[in-house]
Image (spheres, grey):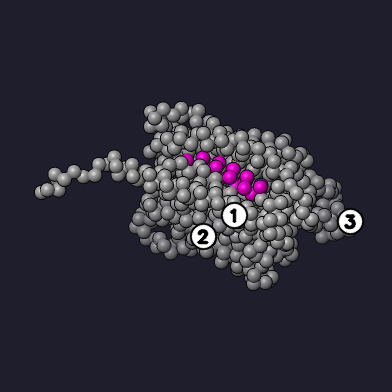
Amino acid sequence: MTAVLTPTPSTVDTVARGRVRRAARRRLVTTLLALAVLVAFAVTLMVGRTFYPPGDVLRVVLGSDVPGASFTVGTLRLPRAVLAVTAGLSFGLAGVTFQTMLRNPLASPDVIGITSGASAAAAFAIVVLGWSGTAVSVTAIVSALGVALLIYSLAFKDGVAGTRLVLIGIGVAAMGKSVTSYVLSKAGAWDFAEALRWLTGSLNGSTWEATVPALLALLVLGPVLLRQTRALSALQLGDDTASALGVRVERTRIIAIIAAVGLLAFATAACGPIAFVSFLAGPIAARLVGPNGSLLVPAALVGALLVLVADLCGQFAFGTRFPVGVVTGVLGAPYLIYLIVRTNRAGGSL
Amino acid sequence: MTSIDTRPAPDAATVRRPVPVRLLWLLAVTAVLVLLMAASVAIGSRGVGWSDILAALGGSTDNIGQAAVTKRIPRTLLAVVVGAALGLSGAVMQGVTRNPLADPGVLGINMGASLAVVAGIAWFGLFSATSIVWTAIVGAAVAAVFVYAVGSLGRGGATPLKLALAGAATSAALTSFITAVALPRGDIAESIVSWEIGGVGGATFAGIGTVAPFLVAGLLISLLSARSLNSLALGDELAAGLGERVALARGVAASGSVLLCGAATAVAGPIGFVGLVVPHLCRLLVGVDHRWLLPFSALAGACLLTGADVLGRIVARPTELDVGILTAIIGAPFFIAIVRRQKVREL
């Protein structure tokens, strides 16, 4: 047989070529996602009861005074669009961080109750105590960290099994939701819009005052999280392998948890727990980008795109104006079931 | 892969209580229920003297105090009825699925009933009380079949954790759909969302009368299947060997349980965790024999819901706290405790 003698193309070459191909795909997908976010952002600014052409919108954003457009675009639509992008990026980043770290797509912070803890605290601070701004965000972040710690310690028993963590999280989420309902009903005025904001998330009535803290948190904590990209990818291989690769496992994990929970809490304090965005962003990004490599940036972009598009749909696609959380909830929940069906089919035994 | 919890199953001697003990507990639970009902009639945002309460119980509504008490009577009755239905339904569900985490709330069956009712009202203009109850029961049945189907896919069949996960996901999905269906109907949205929390505040005798036939039917079916649930508890093969028609027995018992929780949801909204907590506590009191466990669960469920309702009126004075909020706050830690005891393999 001559085949044995012919030199086969070396494995190194194949691996290298695969790497280049995947890197190219990642770059392409990331660029396209970023473009899509930009387009959706622009559409959010232009479309509404009155349509403003791109020229007007651009002039308002750059600070000049356009009659009519200045108020509608500058005061109403701009904070809303900025908050949508900020919240989407934050939820996407935080969600994919948790999913990567716990190696389980179900372990996203909205499924396991961390978001609902933040939401309950924020609702309490705003509705009952009458606070606003930074105090609310701090309350939200403290409570979200507390919930994260609680879930982790409850799930810990000779190691943390993913399924137990998810189910315990679901129990904690049920409590968080009840506390939110309690807070809202105790406030006396059961304001429907306000209630929906804290139960499913909404961008209605966004103001700069609420948006700025979330944006600052993203600008500070986002880079912190992105610097851990490599270490997080290594953690996916298991703790032992990761530390053999030179990753400081505990340090990485603590930094990632604090940064992710912080992002989540600040975004939740601004617009409520927009349902399922942090759960959906990671798996969708994984589909688009393909295997290997970190999902942080693509997932963040997917999150932003989801929130923007869902908000546009919620506002204009139906006869009623749906809050963004209702739209993402209706999209996300069937996907959650699908994921469970697929896991069960694949023979994952619980 | 870590396999956890190798605690031995308690042997028959420890789980089977002697008859006098069970009778004693029966008396105790009944006494507690009577006390709680009295408290539920006596306690509210308006303080009413004993003489007025007694007069109101006699049917008089001469002053505001007596009128207030008159309002509390159907509410108390509803809490008792719904609590009993949910407790019993949970006990049957745990027996049918042989799953300690089964509960109409955890498995999303209440939410199925809710979505059916909300969609019926919003889209098909349902308004008669009876048709709402029927819709709720159909919704509950569909949700039950769906969750069981999803939960039993794959290796190992319907394990407790898989069922609970499928139920939680289904609940989440249904909750989103309910909001989406209810919102466009501004006229009913607010009442639907507050109904969705679950409460017994708006009770009327007429409302209780409408669901009563369904509840009685469910109660009878459930109690009559106690014996077959005992056989099922031994495992399907052994039950079949004892002459039990397994699929039939399971279907009958499940239909009783669905009737109960569907009808309860139709009057009081989706109240979670009662059916989860109650059977576990009752097993501690009377053991695992379903002929005792089922009636006890009904009694204890009534106690739990009436007690939670009274508590909700005390802690949130002068307003009140919907009973669904309280049962979740009491029940969720219980759920977590049971999850922690389950054997879990890391995926």
Residues under numbered marks 1 and 3 in contact, where contact means CB atoms less than 8 Å apart = no
* Residue on which the image places disc 2: B144
Q: Which mark is residue B257?
A: none
Please check the rendered image and state whether residue A191 is part of the magenta-colored stretch, yes or no.
no
* x 69%, y 43%: residue: A211
Give the CA distance from mark 1 to mark 2: 43 Å
- B68 vs A147, left or right, is right
- From the image, state whether disc 2 or disc 3 is nearer to you: 2
Q: Amino acid at mark 1?
A: Val
Q: Which mark is residue A39?
A: 1
Image spot of residue B210 (x, y percent)? 67, 67
Extent of the magenta region: A82-100
- Badge 2: how crowded within 10 Å, few (<14), some, or many (20+)? many
Assign the magenta stretch its main secondary structure.
helix
- From the image, state whether disc 1 or disc 3 is nearer to you: 1
Label 2 chain ID: B
- Badge 3: how crowded within 10 Å, few (<14), some, or many (20+)? few
Q: Amino acid at mark 3?
A: Asn
Label 1 chain ID: A
Q: Earlier in the sequence, mark 2 or mark 3?
A: 3
Q: Is residue A109 visible?
A: yes
Please check the rendered image and state whether residue A86 is part of the magenta-colored stretch, yes or no.
yes
* Residue on which the image places disc 3: B63
Give the CA distance from mark 1 to mark 3: 66 Å
